[in-house]
Amino acid sequence: MAQADITVNDGASAEKMTAADMARRVKMILIGSAGNLVEWYDFYAYAAFALYFAPSFFPNTDPVVQQLQAALLFAFGFIVRPIGGWLFGHFADRYGRRTALTSAVLMMCLGSLVIAVTPTYAQIGIWAPILLAFARVVQGLSLGGQYGTSATYLSEVAHPNHRGFFSSFQYVTLIGGQLTAIFVLLILQNFFLSTEEIKEWGWRVPFYIGGALAIFTAFMQRHLDETEQFTEAKKAAEKSGKKIGGLRQLMNYPKEIAIVVGLTMGGTTAFYTYTTYMQKYLKLSVGLTDEQTTMVTAGSLIFALFLQPLYGALSDRIGRRPLLIFFGVAGTLFTIPILTNLQTATGPWQAFFLIACAWIIVSGYTSINAVVKAELFPTAVRAIGVGLPYAVTVSIFGGSAESVALLFKSQGHESWFYYYLTGIIATSLLVYFFMRDTGKNSAMNRHE
């Protein structure tokens, strides 16, 4: 049996792990995570700089309407994510996780460079938002494939006794990607460009940076080791003459697919509320300045980043399900009070405190949701099993969160979104109550 198949409770086997093998696993996780960080940086640069580039693509004098139009294109990038989850998931299950990861990064590079060079509406008219939409489609396909493949890769290379901890780096790098985009914005704001210069042309800089980082990461991933679980599954399939992966095989796991959808609904809507939408919320609803908005957003993301491995390590001790239930219960009870008080926050420090409280709750989901999904499926369909139903759910709920919130705000009913988010979290809570604890009963610990 391969080392990656050591059972969680097999303490004797765990003690035999050599320092060299542990170093190899850590290296694989870091390089795999680097690709995830670059992917999410490129994707979130759009959200971080939308306040500045929206007037260049959408001719309207109302800033709320401009942001709504930009948010709709952001959501459009999510619509194609299921296609990316299917294509790259199928590819990763049949041909390997490493190649799928590298291909997804290169596709994200293309999308970022298209945004960087696209002329404005004043220069080419309607073709400007059309090209922007094309770039978002490319990025959406890439990200749809990246998530399932990355979650699968990190889970398979992690030591079985520490899967929760190491897999939490899925969201460490995801949050880190957005944080990097915010840091680029901070540096441009405070050291290089004025607000007017950023609005005029400086918003292109982060997309050039993202393209360069993607190329560098793809070069590093050329030497990434394939996971032992995939290698063993491929050998077994070759001996039996059967193909692995594919949508048809995935359909043999309807319960697991339903669990992925149910556990993702509340978590993804909350996550995108406190990440992509929060920057607009702090500016348009709370009334903070551009600099205060950026600082509060960056500070809360740093706080959230450090929570992920702590919660992941905790899940290795007490199980995954208690953390999910904590998120569901606390999210149902406290979402409305947090957002209501945030709307009337008197300054950046109060806003930061309230968002930090939200992250203490949401991290119960973000830190472990990747490993929970990976533990539901056998190796042969793990990448597509994680990626496809997740991407569908994120497209419906996570990707639309910002648009729904801005739509309610534009109609004068901003607080309706608070109840909308609470209802979705409460629905996911029902799934958490009735699902098994994947940390204690994982498909990754069984012969497949």
Image (cartoon, grey):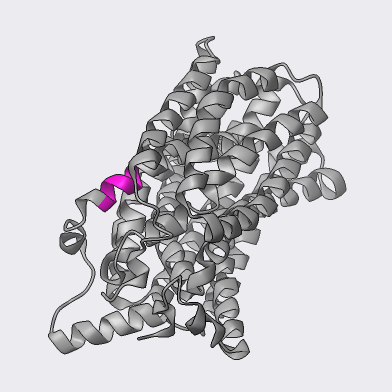
Q: Quadrant of the N terminus?
A: bottom left
Residue 119 appears left or right of 360: left
Whether residue 257 appears in magenta in the rendering, the answer is yes
Residue 238 appears left or right of 72: left
User: Could you tell me residue 282's position as x and y percent?
Assistant: 69, 27
Residue situated in front as seen by the camera: 27 or 284: 27
Residue 116 appears left or right of 427: right
Q: Quadrant of the C terminus?
A: bottom left
Residue situated in front as seen by the camera: 403 or 328: 328
User: Could you tell me residue 49's position as x and y percent?
Assistant: 64, 41
Residue 50 appears left or right of 149: right
Residue under the image location 40 percent in, 38 percent down: 265
Residue under the image location 54 percent in, 9 percent down: 412
**Is residue 60 at all visible to an observer of this figure?**
no
Residue under the image location 48 percent in, 44 percent down: 324
Residue under the image location 61 percent in, 83 percent down: 23
Q: Is residue 6 above or below residue 35?
A: below
User: Could you tell me residue 146's position as x and y percent?
Assistant: 44, 61
Residue situated in front as seen by the camera: 192 or 391: 391
User: Could you tell me residue 191's position as x and y percent?
Assistant: 86, 49
Q: Residue lying farthest right?
A: 191
Magenta segment, which residues?
256-261
Q: Is residue 227 above or below residue 42?
A: below
**Is residue 178 at all visible to an observer of this figure?**
yes
